[in-house]
Image: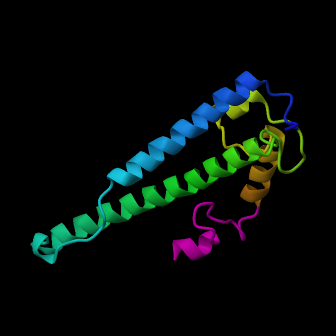
């Protein structure tokens, strides 16, 4: 298979693939260890206990959703690696440097395009979107 990301050496690809696979394994193992969120009404002796458990459960679910979102990005990165296009910017098709990929193996944009996208996002206060929820931020805040 001809790799379009030939600027990355086979050794660099292997290093990045190992990082992605170890993160995938970490998340998968953590998900297997977690308990289901079914509360027994008998365990909730008073409203304070119930409120405390509800807040903790809400935080736990938020972290689980974030990790699921990250797992999707890991799988997407592994897929692009298998197709030979890993490490190419989705915006401008330029190479994403090995240093950036080492720090963030799921990076989809080169640093220049990412900075430009973040500046545009910060300047657009009316249409900001939650990256993990996919909703406009004014919808999330309500």
Is residue 87 highlighted in magenta?
no
In the depicted structure, whether residue 100 falls above or below residue 130: above
Q: Position of residue 82 (x, y in %)?
A: 74, 43
Q: Quadrant of residue 58?
A: bottom left
In the depicted structure, whether residue 2 falls above or below residue 76: above
Q: Position of residue 138 (x, y in %)?
A: 60, 73
Determine the main secondary structure of the stretch shown in magenta.
loop
* Quarter of the rendering occupied by the N terminus: top right
> In this view of the protein, which residue sits in the foreground, 141 or 133?
133
Q: Position of residue 20 (x, y in %)?
A: 60, 39
Q: How many marks?
A: 0
Q: Position of residue 68 (x, y in %)?
A: 52, 57
* Coloring scheme used: rainbow
| Residue at 72%, 25% in the rendered image | 12
Give the extent of the magenta segment: 124-142
User: Is residue 36 shown left or right of residue 71?
Assistant: left
User: Is residue 138 shown left or right of residue 97?
Assistant: left
Is residue 126 highlighted in magenta?
yes
Identity of the residue furthest to the front in this view: 1
User: Is residue 51 shown left or right of residue 110?
Assistant: left
User: Is residue 40 shown left or right of residue 127?
Assistant: left
| Residue at 10%, 75% in the rendered image | 42
Q: Quadrant of residue 53?
A: bottom left
| Residue at 71%, 32% in the rendered image | 100
| Residue at 66%, 66% in the rendered image | 129
């Amino acid at each position: 298979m001809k790799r379009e990301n030939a600027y990355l050496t086979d050794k660099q690809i292997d290093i990045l693939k190992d990082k992605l696979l170890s993160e995938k394994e970490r998340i998968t193992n953590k998900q297997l260890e977690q308990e289901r969120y079914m509360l027994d009404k008998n365990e909730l002796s008073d409203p304070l206990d119930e409120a405390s458990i509800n807040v903790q459960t809400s935080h736990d679910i938020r972290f689980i959703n974030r990790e699921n979102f990250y797992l999707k990005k890991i799988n997407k990165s592994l897929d692009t690696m298998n197709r030979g296009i890993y490490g190419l910017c989705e915006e401008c098709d330029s190479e994403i440097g090995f240093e950036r990929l080492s720090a963030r193996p799921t990076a989809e944009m080169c640093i220049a395009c990412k900075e430009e996208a973040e500046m545009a996002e910060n300047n657009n206060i009316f249409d900001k979107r939650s990256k993990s929820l996919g909703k406009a931020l004014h919808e999330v805040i309500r």
